[in-house]
Image (tube, rainbow, N blue to C red):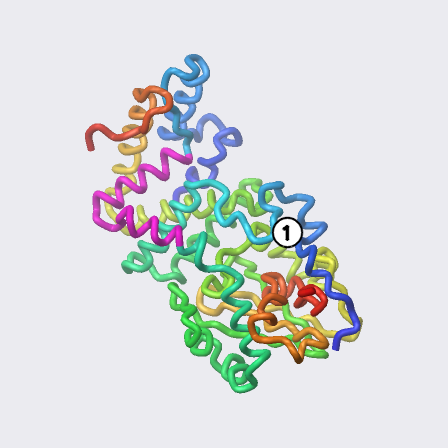
Amino acid sequence: MSKEKAPRSEPAQQPDDNVNKRDKSALATDLDHHDHPHDHSHLDDTALRVRSLQTLLTEKGYIEEAALHALIDTYENKIGPRNGARVIARAWSDPEYKNWLLEDATAAIASLSFQGRQGEHMVVVENTDNTHNLVVCTLCSCYPWPVLGLPPAWYKSAPYRSKAVIDPAGVLTDFGVSLSPDKQIVVWDSTAEVRYLVMPERPENSAHLSEAELSLLVTRNSMIGTGLALPVETLS
Amino acid sequence: MSNHTPKDTNPEPSLLLEVIPDQFKDDQGPVFAEPWQADVFAITVSLHQQGMFTWQEWADALSQSIARAQDSGDPDLGDTYYHHWLNALEHMVESRNPGARLRLADLYQQWDEAARSTPHGQPIELLCR
């Protein structure tokens, strides 16, 4: 990508001599809009760029509106942390499934009909008496979409991405999680090819709970490692 | 184990949250803060599914976009994430489709003119392509 493009979405920070044709257009639109409010429509720079992409790719036959709507609906409404919670609750309830999940998470998760669209390899890491796992993507925001949905904003933020590696204990403190001092924290850096999911420790006194009830104790953050599974009392 | 008390009922990070805008603070969402973010996300996944690029290539492009933004002074707190995404998407489309850059610039002007010639409150449409 050319250098002038990155700051295009923030024209206020751009030196004048770097303002390209599109930015000038957006600026002119702004001025016109302010001079003559409410008598015509206005699209900001970002909206104009997105519409231009949509038009170009539709012209070329790469995208169809219905397919895009279906994708958005899936990620807004059908995929989310409840998928991952079902995986964890199954593992807590079924030792054979747990072994399969730890050995071949991609297949074990796919058996519950949760499959990645990017062909990523899934790895599940288990929290134990001695180890607490924490997942991050230091470069961008690779994330196990099929089981957690799309990542929360903090997961995508530079403070989390850097601090998780430099000071994972500090990150846990930020999230209100306190571990016993002798517990080791292991940080897993996700990539486009390998996505990690944390299997939190099963809550104490939960032997009597059904798989469905157990899944209610598995939070999104507990599967990233920035939280713990909820205590059994939460259900009452 | 556990000799500690789970506190996931308040699962957002206290210190990290001080620098993250309010609209991002809820636990499970929103997935997309604005509709255009959903659009660029879906376009990217759709192009990947059709083989325009591998997901590794996309992750590389997005990483580079984020790094460039940080170099330009973006504190990169998560709220500009989809702007990085849009920059990376434009790069991917332009690098794999000769002539796309010029066509995008042309379409940008057309959409801008269409907006300015559309009475407020009415749908904006391109009249000629």
Mark 1 belongs to chain: A
Q: Is residue A120 magenta?
A: no
Residue nearer the viewer, A227 or A195: A227
| Residue A51, horizontal then vertical, whole percent | 33, 37
Label 1 is placed on what type of residue? Answer: Pro
| Outermost residue toward the left in this view | B128
Left or right side of B37 for B127: left
| Residue A18 percent location from the top left of the image | 44, 31
Residue B117, by quadrant, is top left
Q: Which x, y percent locates residue B7?
A: 73, 61
Answer with left or right where residue A157 lies relative to residue A39.
right
**Of all residues shown, which one is farthest toward the top?**
A35
The residue sitting at 72% across, 79% down in the picture is: A129
Q: Between residue A163 and residue B16, name the one nearer to us.
A: B16
Give the magenta range.
Answer: A46-73
Which residue is drawn at the image coordinates 59% and 64% (left, top)?
Answer: A224
Q: Residue at x 48, y 31 (%)?
A: A11
The residue where tag 1 is placed is: A159
Q: Nearer the viewer, residue A167 or A99?
A: A99
Image quadrant where one finds the N terminus of chain B = bottom right
Q: How many marks?
A: 1
Q: Element at badge 1? A: helix
